Image (spheres, rainbow, N blue to C red):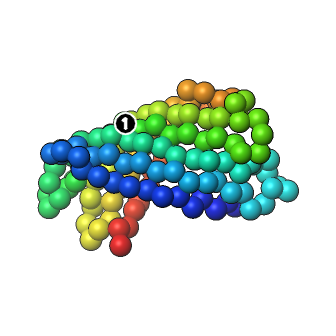
Amino acid sequence: MALTPRYEFWTNPVGPWVVRGSSGFFVPMNKAETPAQTSFVGGIAVGRYFTPHDVPFGDLVFYCESNFLVPLDGGASRFTVVSVGPGSRFHIANNYFFLADWDFPVTGNKPDCYTLQVALLKVF
C-alpha cells in the first residue's frame, strides 16, 4: 500500500493538441513487507484528439508519454526509473473513459520489458 499525492494538469495549447503533466511523491505505507522507497514521481505526455466528444469513441486521443521515479532515500542515481511509451484514451458514455498505455523502461534496473496499464476512468 502506498500514498501518491500529486499535482496534475491538462491543457490544450493549440487546436486538437493536448499536454498532460504531473509531479508528486510515492510514499510506501508498509515498508516492512516490501522494499519500496519514498520517491519523487512525475511525467509528461503530448497527444492529439482525433474525434469530437459526442460520437462513438469520442475524445479519442493518441499520445506519447514519459514518466519518472526518483528515490529520495539514497541511491537515486542507481534506482531512478524513466520510461516512455504510447497510449490512447476515449470517451465511452456518461463521463466514463477507457485508457490504455504501454511504458517501456529506458533506465533503472529494468525489472520488466514493458508495463501495460488499462483503466476505466470516471470524470467528476
Quadrant containing the C terminus in the rendered view? bottom left
- The structure residue drawn at horizontal position 43% and vertical position 56%, both measured from the top left corner, is 8
- When asked about the image quadrant of residue 2, the answer is bottom right
- Is 17 on the left or on the right of 41, as rendered? left
Residue at the extreme right of the image, as rendered: 32
Q: How many marks?
A: 1
Quarter of the figure with residue 4:
bottom right
Quarter containing the N terminus: bottom right
Task: Find residue 17 and report its horizontal and vertical position in percent.
Answer: 22, 43
| Element carrying mark 1 | strand
Q: Nearer the viewer, residue 23 or 112?
A: 23
Label 1 sits on what residue type?
A: Cys
Q: Which of the 4 image quadrants contains residue 81?
A: top right
Lateral position of residue 34 relative to residue 52, left or right: right
Name which residue lies at 57% across and 61% down.
Answer: 5
Q: Residue at x 29, y 68 (%)?
A: 95
Tell me residue 18's x, y (percent).
27, 46
Relative to residue 54, is residue 9 drawn left or right?
A: right
Q: In this rendered view, identify the residue nearer to me: 31 or 88.
A: 31
Question: Is residue 13 shown above or below 94?
Answer: above
Residue 31 visible in the picture: yes
Residue 111 visible: no
Q: Residue at x 48, y 58 (%)?
A: 7
The residue where tag 1 is placed is 64
- Name the one closer to the observer, 61 or 3: 3
- Asked if 5 appears above or below 44 in the picture, the reply is below
Query: Residue 48: x, y in percent?
Result: 24, 42
Instruction: Classify residue 68 as left or right of residue 66.
Output: right
Q: Residues within 10 Å of mark 1 (few under 14, many from 20)?
A: some
Q: Is residue 95 above or below residue 66?
A: below
Compared with 34, 46 (above or below) is above
